[in-house]
Image: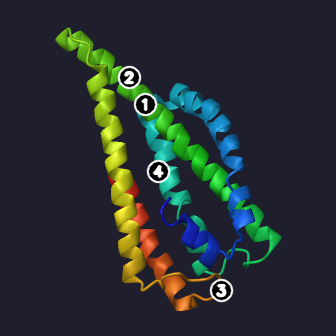
Amino acid sequence: NTSLTIYFGRHFWGLTTAEMGALQLPYFLSAFAALFVAPWCAGRWGKKNAAIVPSVLAVIMTPLPIVLRLLDLFPLNGTIELYYTLMAFYTVDVMLMIAAAILTAAMLADVVEDSELATGRRSEGSFFAASSFVQKAINGLGVVLAGQILAAVNFPEHAQPGTVPASVLDDLAVAFIPAIVVLYLCA
């Protein structure tokens, strides 16, 4: 998702560099909101289910703007409605991902405590190092998969905004949707 953001932003949505930069600003709001949403969800459903709910919602939210565009149910490129609709979608999507990450980290801390009770050894370094390693490996895999998707749809190298054929952009969207859903569900 992150690796393809610039391709979708510049070519699929037709955003300017300034618009893409400004779309990052609500992420601060997302992080702040997640600080309240995560504990509220944990108190309501318990940590495990509270981590599952925003994760599943993120699986739905992440590709939803692209799906809606393919169905001609999304604002047109170049409109202020598109910009603010994307801003709203991205803000909620990132908030869901951050809330899920908060809850997952809290559960990992619980596992560390349970491990210490069961073994009598402190091993939080091993648990958190393994978690960090997996995150780094997944980020690397994401870059590779994004490159493979771009190659599979014959995305032109050094493409300028407005020059990529609509059929290639549609192919990119159609390849992205199942890929992101499958990868999110695996996670």
> Quick check: marks 4 and 2 in contact, CB under 8 Å?
no
Q: Which of 53 and 148 is in front in this view?
A: 148
Q: Which residue occupies 74% across, 70% down?
A: 82
Is residue 100 or residue 155 the one in the foreground? 155
- Residue at disc 4, secondary structure: helix
Q: How far apart are marks 3 and 1 (CA)?
A: 42 Å
Which amino acid does the dot numbered 3 rest on? Gly
Give, as a three-letter code, the residue at label 1: Ala
Q: In this view, does 164 lie above or below 3?
A: below
Q: Distance of mark 4 from mark 3, alpha carbons? A: 34 Å
Front: mark 4 or 1: 1
Q: Nearer the viewer, mark 4 or mark 2?
A: 2
Give the x, y percent position of residue 48: 41, 33
Residue beneath label 1, please? 105
Are dots 1 and 2 in contact, CB under 8 Å?
yes
Using the numbered discs, state the Cα–Cα distance from disc 4 to disc 2 in whole angstroms.
Answer: 22 Å
